[in-house]
Image: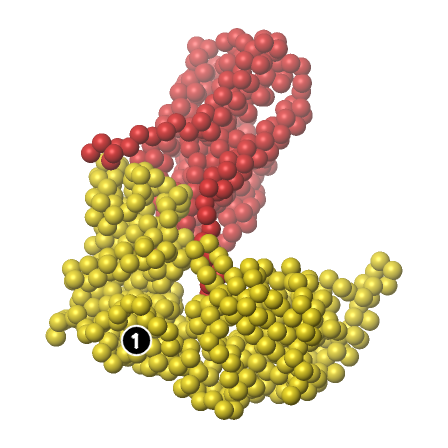
């Protein structure tokens, strides 16, 4: 058995209100590809941020070559031979390959840059890794796969690099490119580099990894040898949490409820032919992993992004939705997962935000009737209990849950019958969460139809009448609530490449 | 219904600019020569007319988070074309005076199209129209100086309506009227409400079904209209309009807006603040010359006032932000 390079033990990490890592461990051997898997929010990234010095651990120890180390920042990590390749590549597109590799430590001749030597050094490095790219090429001209290799070469140009973390390296690659990447990874293995491989793609893990560690809800679940494990086993480990909340037992939607929204073959860059129906009074859950195209689908429905093709029908009639103006008038309201960026005007008052989608109804010939605006805001503040001292309070000073309610109020005032909640409980504390759930149920009972996008499976199982699962831009399945289980959802949500 | 109305607290920060104006005035009243007099006050007013109009217009644009660099040359171009209509095309003065703001409106509309529809950065778009309007003014006037009616000419009513009458600075009435109108638009109408919404979060406004592009065009057009109106008062103040000038004036107007507490990043600002900002600059101008410092000193000190005003604004924003607690939304994500 190869020697152990890295050991992380008993790692604890707290954020205000969140126990992000609870007694987590991880081990990496020389020349090993060790996959780290888990759902969104399982703590994989936090764990790696602790390792690379972005976050400081609150307890536990990190050992490299069996010696305890302290990693206070990324510089420390680099000095210990730890490099990370992020999903979003950090290359400067207008610089050459050589310039990118040696940025910040360019070889110099006196005060001048020694470009020739830099190119030669880059060439040597690339050849030694058998990467066939000219060091003088502009990075922007390379394919994503090649750019990734440049990034890896850069990581390895720090001579001591022995631990390489790859965060979803295959996400943006085609199948041939993935093959290329894997050949390259095997090369690195042969050189004795230890690789932490983060991915959602089960089939891929089978091909490339030696061991797999599963995390869930900030906890260490287990480490298995890839050869001796089945994919189903891994999925069970990923989702097999204790569910505190009872999932919904059966759909609340009456038989024969009319279809209020129908999407037919929606397509854009990220969405590949999604069709579905939404019934009156229904809560339709959208499940999937990060990047599955759920938010993108929602944005197509509300006209926020341009769609290549596809049709949208509201109450059986074709709706010509070109921009959010049209969607709002068709009665569709969108509550973004990032409400600060897409939902609220933070420096403005509760009343102004609540009336934003309906301002023309409160305007006489010219003048906005502020009394009416504040009256309606006040009414909704009471009705869905927005905890704000007055309706003149600026939204910026409210808590996350109450900000979310302000957005809800905006669409209720507009009298939207179709509401799309995109990760409605993200960044909201437990108490406010159950209030949002209650509100959503109440709305559905009143005959509003809801699409709920969520990455938290217990939440989806508890709220939805039906669950649509997406993976990499495609709809991979639709489950009635009676038949839906975490395992079934995960099996549909995980890419099979 | 008591808590519906909710008592509004006095925001002491808002009193900063008026206080600065009063202090400046008292300072120069004590130390300046011939400053504390009717004549001195009149001069302060007279030098703020056309800057004030431009500043009021550009306040709308700055609240959306944009900028309009073309207002100075658009003002000049409008004034030149008005003068041309009056002195070369034989238009009656009153008709020519209608043309002046229309020219401004046109350029503002073009700015709006460039920014909202063609998605040019406002800085670049309006830099372009700044040069275009400057050149256009010169071209149509044939690089000749234009004259507005002076005292003693048959149309001398022009100056007594827009500039001075019986030693009364009547232009001030127009300026106050314009600011009153601008403040009404900004605070009471849908136009103003969307102005703030776009400035504080354009994407949220768009997703709420606001036709952001169209409103932005309207806002830029409004700014152009005000710049055009400024042209009338420039004509009234100087009576001779020389082609090729006007750039630089927009910066005086923008400085006034900034001193008045409108944030360059958009989403907040007041017309009253802008008016006070413009008056502070005019007071500084008159005051510094009353203590014997020439024009270049005025420029020098105005620079300090602008920087000081923005530093204060930043400090205030930081203080406001400190209260917020950032939840680690990204922290638990994997």
Q: Chain of mark 1?
A: A
Which residue is nearer to you in this view: B78 or A373? A373
Q: The residue tagged with tag 1: helix, strand or loop?
A: strand
Q: Is residue A61 visible?
A: yes
Q: Position of residue A304 (x, y in %)?
A: 36, 62
Residue A232 falls in image quadrant = bottom left
- The chosen color scheme is by chain
Please name the residue shown 74% across and 83% down the image: A128
Q: In the image, what residue occupies the spot 41% across and 73% down?
A: A289
Which residue bears the numbered disc 1? A468
Image coords of residue A43 (percent x, y): 48, 68
Say which colour chain B has.
red
Q: Residue at x 54, y 13 (%)?
A: B26
Residue B191 in sight: no
Q: Position of residue B32 (x, y in %)?
A: 61, 11
Q: Please say if A367 is above or below A62.
A: above
Q: Residue furthest right?
A: A110
* Quadrant location, the N terminus of chain A: bottom right
Number of disc labels: 1
- Locate residue A192, reporting x and y percent: 69, 83
Residue nearest the viewer, comparing A188 with A308: A188
Residue A342 position by quadrant: bottom left
Residue B25, compared with residue A135, is above or below; it is above
The answer to whether B330 is drawn above or below residue A405 in the figure is: below
Other-residue count near label 1 (Cα within 10 Å), few / some / many at <14 / 14–19 / ≥20 = many
Chain letter tied to yellow: A
Instruction: Place residue A99 in its image quadrant.
Output: bottom right
Q: For this rendering, which residue is in front, A266 or A202? A: A202
**Is B230 positioned to the left or the right of A439 in the image?**
right
């Amino acid at each position: 058995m190869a020697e152990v390079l890295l050991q992380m033990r008993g790692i604890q990490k707290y954020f205000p209100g969140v126990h992000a890592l609870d007694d987590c461990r991880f081990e990496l051997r020389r020349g090993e590809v060790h996959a780290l898997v888990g759902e969104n929010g399982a703590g994989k990234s936090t764990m790696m941020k602790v390792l690379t010095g972005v976050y400081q651990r609150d307890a536990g120890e990190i050992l490299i070559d069996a010696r305890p180390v302290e990693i206070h920042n990324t510089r420390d990590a680099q000095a210990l031979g730890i490099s990370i390749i992020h999903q979003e590549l950090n290359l400067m597109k207008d610089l050459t390959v050589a310039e990118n590799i040696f940025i910040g430590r360019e070889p110099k001749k006196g005060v001048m840059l020694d470009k020739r030597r830099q190119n030669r050094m880059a060439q040597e490095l690339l050849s030694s890794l058998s990467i066939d790219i000219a060091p003088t090429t502009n990075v922007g001209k390379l394919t994503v796969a090649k750019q990734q290799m440049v990034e890896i070469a850069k990581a390895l140009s720090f001579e001591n690099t022995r631990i390489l973390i790859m965060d979803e390296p295959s996400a943006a690659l085609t199948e041939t490119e993935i093959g290329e990447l894997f050949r390259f990874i095997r090369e690195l293995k042969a050189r004795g580099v230890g690789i932490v491989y983060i991915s959602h793609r089960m089939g891929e893990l089978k091909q490339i990894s030696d061991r797999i560690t599963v995390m869930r809800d900030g906890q260490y679940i287990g480490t298995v040898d890839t050869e001796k494990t089945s994919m189903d086993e891994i999925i069970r480990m990923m989702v097999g949490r204790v569910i505190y909340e009872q999932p919904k037992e059966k759909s609340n939607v009456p038989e024969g409820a009319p279809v209020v929204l129908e999407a037919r073959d929606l397509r854009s860059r990220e969405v590949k032919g999604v069709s579905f129906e939404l019934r009156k009074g229904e809560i339709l859950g959208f499940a999937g992993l990060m990047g599955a195209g759920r938010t993108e689908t929602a944005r197509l429905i509300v006209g926020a992004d341009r769609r290549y093709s596809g049709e949208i029908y509201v109450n059986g009639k074709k709706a010509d939705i070109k921009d959010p103006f049209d969607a709002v008038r068709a009665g569709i309201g969108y509550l973004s997962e990032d409400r600060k960026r897409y939902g609220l005007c933070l420096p403005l008052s509760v009343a102004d935000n609540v009336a934003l989608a309906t301002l023309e109804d409160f305007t006489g010939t010219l003048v906005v009737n502020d009394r009416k605006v504040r009256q309606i805001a006040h009414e909704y503040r009471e009705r869905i209990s927005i905890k704000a001292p007055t309706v003149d309070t600026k939204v910026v000073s409210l808590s996350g849950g109450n900000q979310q309610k302000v957005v809800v109020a905006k669409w209720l005032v507009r009298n939207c019958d179709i509401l799309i909640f995109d990760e409605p409980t993200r960044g909201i504390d437990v108490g406010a969460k159950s209030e949002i759930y209650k509100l959503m149920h109440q709305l559905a009972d009143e005959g509003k139809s809801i699409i709920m996008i969520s990455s938290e499976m217990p939440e989806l199982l508890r709220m939805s009448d039906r669950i649509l699962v997406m993976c990499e831009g495609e709809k991979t399945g639709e489950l009635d609530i009676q038949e839906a289980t975490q395992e079934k959802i995960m099996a549909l949500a995980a890419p099979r490449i | 219904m008591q808590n519906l109305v909710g008592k509004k607290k006095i925001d002491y920060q808002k009193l900063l600019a008026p206080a600065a104006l009063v202090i400046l005035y008292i300072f120069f009243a004590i130390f300046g020569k011939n400053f504390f007099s009717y004549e001195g006050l009149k001069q302060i007013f007279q030098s703020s007319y056309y800057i004030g109009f431009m500043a009021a217009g550009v306040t709308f644009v700055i609240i959306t988070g944009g900028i309009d660099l073309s207002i100075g040359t658009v003002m000049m171009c409008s004034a030149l074309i008005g003068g041309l209509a009056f002195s070369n095309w034989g238009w009656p003065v009153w008709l020519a005076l209608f043309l002046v703001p229309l020219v401004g409106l046109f350029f503002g509309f073009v700015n709006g199209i460039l920014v909202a529809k063609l998605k040019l950065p406002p800085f670049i778009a309006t830099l372009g129209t700044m040069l275009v309007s400057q050149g256009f003014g010169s071209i149509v006037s044939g690089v000749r100086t234009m004259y507005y009616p002076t005292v003693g000419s048959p149309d001398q009513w022009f100056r007594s309506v827009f500039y001075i009458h019986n030693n009364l600075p009547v232009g001030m009435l127009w300026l106050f009227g314009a600011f009153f109108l601008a403040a009404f638009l900004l605070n009471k109408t849908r136009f103003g409400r969307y102005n703030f919404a776009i400035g504080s979060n354009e994407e949220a406004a768009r997703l709420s079904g606001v036709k952001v592009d169209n409103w932005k065009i309207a806002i830029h057009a409004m700014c152009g209209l005000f710049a055009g109106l400024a042209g009338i008062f420039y004509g009234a103040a100087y009576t001779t309009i020389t082609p090729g000038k006007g750039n630089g004036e927009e910066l005086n107007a923008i400085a006034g807006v900034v001193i008045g507490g409108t944030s360059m990043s958009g989403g907040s600002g007041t017309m009253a603040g802008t008016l006070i900002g413009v008056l502070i600059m005019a007071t500084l101008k008159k005051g510094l010359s009353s203590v014997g410092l020439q024009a270049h000193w005025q420029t020098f000190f105005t620079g300090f006032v602008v920087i000081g005003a923005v530093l204060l604004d930043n400090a205030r924003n930081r203080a406001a932000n400190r209260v917020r607690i950032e939840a680690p939304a990204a922290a638990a994500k994997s």
